[in-house]
Image (cartoon, rainbow, N blue to C red):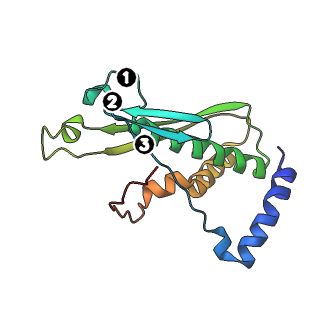
Amino acid sequence: MDAEALRAVQAPLKNRYREDPDTARITARAEARLDRTDVAVTIPAWHGATVAGLHPAAGGDGSQACSADMLLEALVACAGVTLRAVATAMGIALRGGRVVAEGFWDARGTLGVDRAAPVGITDIKLTFELDTDAEPAKVERLIASAERYCVILQTLRTPPRVAVTRGTPAVA
């Protein structure tokens, strides 16, 4: 896709969102189905199902997806797609590259070994490795724009309000 095609696709959306801001509020949804016998869940997704379970540091055998890894996968997916869209709009040719996220967490907190140890990822490092001939200043603007418009990165930087509720199981 080139810049002209991207603008053509996005222009009607941008116009609609300007004219009717309520149409820009999108509901994202995910669901996990509890496994009856294993410490695992199945997450139905557009590409099939992902089975997530315990990380080896918490007692898993490594055969199931780890939710911390999945969070980082969502981050690199969003950052990468956003970067490609911005590069396209800016006319920056990318021959390739990688977006890498590393997150650090303390298993002592997760397993309740040390109440002072944090639960969850405490530090994330996001790295853009780009194969391009673009001027360094232009690459810096590209990365800054990708940072600015990456939904997952901005969500992590400014956490949303999270409500936890208990629902009633649906009758099959």
Q: Residue furthest front?
A: 172
The secondary element bearing badge 1 is classed as loop
Q: How far is disc 1 from disc 3 in space, using C-alphas?
A: 19 Å
Q: Which mark is residue 62?
A: 1
Rendering coords of residue 124 (x, y %):
40, 43
Residue indicated by mark 2? 55
Q: Is residue 146 above or below residue 33?
A: below
Which residue sits at x=66%, y=76%? 21
Who comes first in sequence, dot 2 or dot 3?
3
Number of numbered discs: 3
Q: Quarter of the image containing the N terminus?
A: top right
Side (left or right) of 32 relative to 15: left
Front residue of this view, candidates 149 and 93: 149
Rendering coords of residue 69 (x, y %):
43, 35
Front residue of this view, candidates 51 and 121: 51
Question: What amino acid is labelled 1 in the image?
Answer: Gly
Which residue sits at x=13%, y=46%? 115
**Residue contact between numbered discs 2 and 1, judged by CB atoms under 8 Å:** yes
Which residue sits at x=43%, y=31%? 65
Label 2 environment density (alpha carbons within 10 Å; few <14, some 14–19, many ≥20): some
Who comes first in sequence, dot 1 or dot 3?
3
Question: What amino acid is labelled 3 in the image?
Answer: Arg
Residue indicated by mark 3? 33
Side (left or right) of 65 relative to 142: left
Side (left or right) of 73 relative to 97: left
**Residue contact between numbered discs 2 and 3, judged by CB atoms under 8 Å:** no
Question: What amino acid is labelled 2 in the image?
Answer: His
Q: Which mark is residue 131?
A: none
Label 1 environment density (alpha carbons within 10 Å; few <14, some 14–19, many ≥20): few
The secondary element bearing badge 2 is classed as loop
